[in-house]
Amino acid sequence: MKSLVRAAVIGVLLSTTALATAQAQPAAPAVAPLSGTALTISAFGEVRTAPDMATITIGVLTQGATANDASTVNAARMNSMMAALRRAGIADRDVQTSGLNLNPQYAYEQNQPPRLTGYQANNQVTVRVMDLARLGASLDATVGAGANEIQGVSFGLRNPVAAEDEARRRAVAALQAKASVYAQALGKPIDRMVSISEGGGYQPVPPRPMALQARADKAFATPVSPGEMSVRIDVDATYQLGR
């Protein structure tokens, strides 16, 4: 009998605790169900602005009869190129190795096994140029120091937040304007915006191929025009129209 009473008391305590815990938890906010006509539209906001930095990928490609020959010549030219970058005002933190390869080279003839002809060494670095006024001189300096591969120049922004926020404001304004046109055409009022989602955003300008040669006349740096770049935000939204 005592065991039955004890079990009943424990059961009441557990039920009371569970009820108190459930009451203590905040209720999930109620979402008003969508009623009336749903309007789903897309828009974008775009800001064009001048870039304030550039990224270049520069490399040294060398050939040698042996792997050691190719690597030794390559290392010497890379050291000269790195020193030229420092003299041009590029900080060490803005230079990062992005490729390093050493490959045998073969000659292929019909009905003959491949014949080893030597080795090819390739070393590439990605360089951030934080002062665009130094860009042309930096390119010339590296070529003059032995660089013989330039993948291209990519322009970008150090801090794209301000441009992105302005693009967002323009995107929302475009959404509102477009929604108003639909609502007027349908003869219905706009009750509320139900949802909104974002896509797009800041993307650096893709690298542009370049072909440079060492310049005999060092009085003029290679001209590089950064132009403008686009920062675009895409948005999708759903509105509820009245009756």
Image: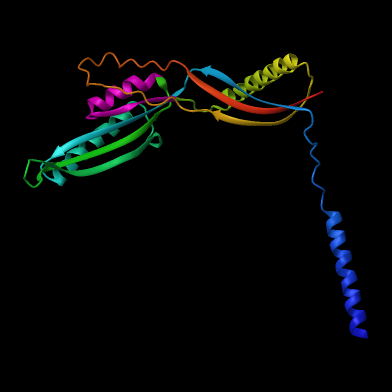
Residue 99: % across, % down: 31, 40
Residues in magenta, as a range: 133-155
User: In the image, 106: left or right of 31?
Assistant: left
Q: Quadrant of the C terminus?
A: top right
Q: Residue at x 40, y 34 (%)?
A: 94
- Camera-nearest residue between 225 and 95: 225
Residue 140: % across, % down: 28, 22
Residue 69: % across, % down: 14, 43
Q: Residue at x 87, y 66 (%)?
A: 15
In the rendered view, how is the structure colored?
rainbow
Q: Quadrant of the N terminus?
A: bottom right
Magenta span contains residue 143: yes
User: In the image, 163: left or right of 58?
Assistant: right
Q: Is residue 222 above or below residue 72?
A: above
Q: Residue at x 53, y 23 (%)?
A: 231
Residue 224's image quarter? top left
Q: Is residue 40 above or below residue 123?
A: above
Residue extending farthest to the bottom is: 1
Magenta span contains residue 25: no
Q: Residue at x 66, y 22 (%)?
A: 172
Number of numbered markers: 0
Q: Is residue 53 above or below residue 125?
A: above
Residue 92's image quarter? top left
Residue 39: % across, % down: 70, 25
- Camera-nearest residue between 137 and 107: 107
User: In the image, 242: left or right of 118?
Assistant: right
